[in-house]
């Protein structure tokens, strides 16, 4: 029986994940959208352990696994950041981790996962089902699947990012976060609305991976065909059964950004803030920089959700 | 009459520069030199206002100029980071700034200087004397020269970086900083030795701009011929008359790093720490990463002194 996502579940995660997740810094920028006079508070999850927010949810989930189940290990599928997070949390508990990763995942995401002692199974993103491969591993080992986003403990863990941000900044007109499967935004929205019912919430997707945007329009979860986007962490094909209702309840709108807007934002964050943010991690900032938000906002929290990108890819921007 | 550089002069600078200089974060890394088990504490001056430590010294100097002199403006020569710092401090006081910059300075250093309202005079680094051009401007305007490094108030301002670092970390076996003209290291060494007489101090230069290294060997200030190095902020041709005696008194050794070592370090800081550090700003980290320090150190403070680098240059690393 799953626990239910609530502000309390997010608050409970704070202590649990403390040995594994960093309290990341918040940087203020007035230059990202100077014309609008906007104060932008960046929550720097690119500086998080494992280079992304994913350690929050993965460690909250893995540290909740019953002691008798842990020796059979954990299993996950991920294009990268969740993989590394699961590997780090499993290593911390001396549990075996098996990770199913697409063969074309960035090297910057594969290598650190291996460095943390995980066993990696590569698959072809266009031909094979990662879920089927993971199921097979679980059948053989009896391991526990660590879902990438669609679980209350995962969402609650991710929500600690917003909790820390709001404890640092106190007031924000709005909070903006990237949407892949929706776990980060669902967790953040739940705690943010509990702290301040007036806060406005926005999710951001690449135009090319707009499943949540289309689902919002349709009023129910819609599945899209597999898409190519440089935001490799946001390629989920449909919102989760746990995440989507939470997003529907709390989130005002899903904003879309183009590949060029993402690239320009990665470059701008690097040149002006001196911060390396990966394409998936930069989409919320891209929405702010490219004026996709309502114009009456004065202070906005933006989650920079990750920083793992291959240098060779970056150099082509 | 110049004030004398002392720990008190550094402490006096703290309050004076507060309206202009950020208290920058310190990041701990155990991965930069894992074999040695070294704890490396990075003082992130790349996240400083203007993208470099230079605002500390420039604002300490400019905020000390007598009120009756300020209306005639300030003048500076700089390959970049000092230029931007002087422009920011002058803008803050509504004073006119004239900056003499090499025509081949990185765009990332020229444009922000102009954005802060400075008047820029370009010169040819190989054929013209920047000092002569600055002298001419001063003769015409009666402005005050803001020296790039060789002045007690500049050195004292830069020293606040080490003061903040030691207030954050409390104990360090050693402190390592880049050396151009030596202002940063002189200020940092003065305050660090006052706080902890046992702390060991090291400066780092590019092999290709080794004037301070050679001066240490000779026992007196030695001038080298103009050199090309990607560390464009460390091209000073000889140590200063104020800085050098301070370095001789406090600094154990000057370490040298190659162009390739600097490049590899910029890339490593970017990929692993998610921080953009310019070549000049990365030389101290390069010395740690490439094992140039004594092997008996356990905890080291490293000043990442700046983060202004053109994207196009970075992409070639």
Image (cartoon, coloured by chain):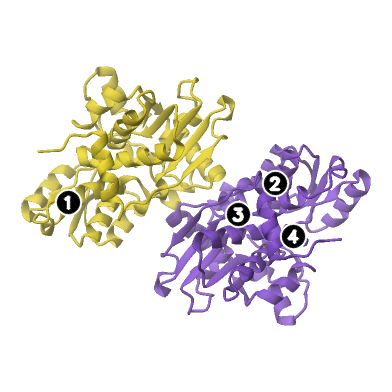
Chain colours: A yellow, B purple
The answer to which of A278 and B146 lies nearer the viewer is: B146
Residue linked to disc 2: B84
Mark 3 surroundings within 10 Å by alpha-carbon count, few (fewer than 14), some (14 through 19), many (20 or more): many
Instruction: Say whether residue B213 is visible.
Output: yes
The answer to whether the residues at label 4 and label 2 have Cβ atoms under 8 Å apart is no
Residue linked to disc 3: B306
Q: Nearer the viewer, mark 4 or mark 3?
A: 4
The answer to whether the residues at label 1 and label 3 have Cβ atoms under 8 Å apart is no
Classify residue A186 as left or right of residue B117: left
Co-location on one chain, circles 3 and 2: yes
Of the image marks 3 and 2, the number of the one nearer the N terminus: 2
Instruction: Indicate the chain on which mark 3 is placed.
Output: B
Classify residue A138 as left or right of residue B309: left
Instruction: Indicate the chain on which mark 1 is placed.
Output: A
Above or below, comparing residue B230 to residue A37 in the picture: below
Residue B45 location (% of width, % of height): 58, 54
Classify residue B217 as left or right of residue A21: right
Instruction: Indicate the chain on which mark 4 is placed.
Output: B
Report how far apart the C-alphas of labels 1 and 4 lie in the structure. Answer: 56 Å
Q: Secondary structure at mark 2?
A: helix
Locate the N terminus of chain A and report the quarter of the image it occupies. Answer: top left
Q: Report the disc number at residue B149.
A: 4
Residue A239 location (% of width, % of height): 24, 30
Mark 1 surroundings within 10 Å by alpha-carbon count, few (fewer than 14), some (14 through 19), many (20 or more): many
Q: Secondary structure at mark 3?
A: loop
Q: Nearer the viewer, mark 1 or mark 4?
A: 4
Q: Secondary structure at mark 4?
A: loop
Tell me which residue sits at (40%, 31%) in the image.
A176
Co-location on one chain, circles 1 and 2: no
The answer to whether the residues at label 3 and label 2 have Cβ atoms under 8 Å apart is no
Of the image marks 4 and 2, the number of the one nearer the N terminus: 2
């Amino acid at each position: 029986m799953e626990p239910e996502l609530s502000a309390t579940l997010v608050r409970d995660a704070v202590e649990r994940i403390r040995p594994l997740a960093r309290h990341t810094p918040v940087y203020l920028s007035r230059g990202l959208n100077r014309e609008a006079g906007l104060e932008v508070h960046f929550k720097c999850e690119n500086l998080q352990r494992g280079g992304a927010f994913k350690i929050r949810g993965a460690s909250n989930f893995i540290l909740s696994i019953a002691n008798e189940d842990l020796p059979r290990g954990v299993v996950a599928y991920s294009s990268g950041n969740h993989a590394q997070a699961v590997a780090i949390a499993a290593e911390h508990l001396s549990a075996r981790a098996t990770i199913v990763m697409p063969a074309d995942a960035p090297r910057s995401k594969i290598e650190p996962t291996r460095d943390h002692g995980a066993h990696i199974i590569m698959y072809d993103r266009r031909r094979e089902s990662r879920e089927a491969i993971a199921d097979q591993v679980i059948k053989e080992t009896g391991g526990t699947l660590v879902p990438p986003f669609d679980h209350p403990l995962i969402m609650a863990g991710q929500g600690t990012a917003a909790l820390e941000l709001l404890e640092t900044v106190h007031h924000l007109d709005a909070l903006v976060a990237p949407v892949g499967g929706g776990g980060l935004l669902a967790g953040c929205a739940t705690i943010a609305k509990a702290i301040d019912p007036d806060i406005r919430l926005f999710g951001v997707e690449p135009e090319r991976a707009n499943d949540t945007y289309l689902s919002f329009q349709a009023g129910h979860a819609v599945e899209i065909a597999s898409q190519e986007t440089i935001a490799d962490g946001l390629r989920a094909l449909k919102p989760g059964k746990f995440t989507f209702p939470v997003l529907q309840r709390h989130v005002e709108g899903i904003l879309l950004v183009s590949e060029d807007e993402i690239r320009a934002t990665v470059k701008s964050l690097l040149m002006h803030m001196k911060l390396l943010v990966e394409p998936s991690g930069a989409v919320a900032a891209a929405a702010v920089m490219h004026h996709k938000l309502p114009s009456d906002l004065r202070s906005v929290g933006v989650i920079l959700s990750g920083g793992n990108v291959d240098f060779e890819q970056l150099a082509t921007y």
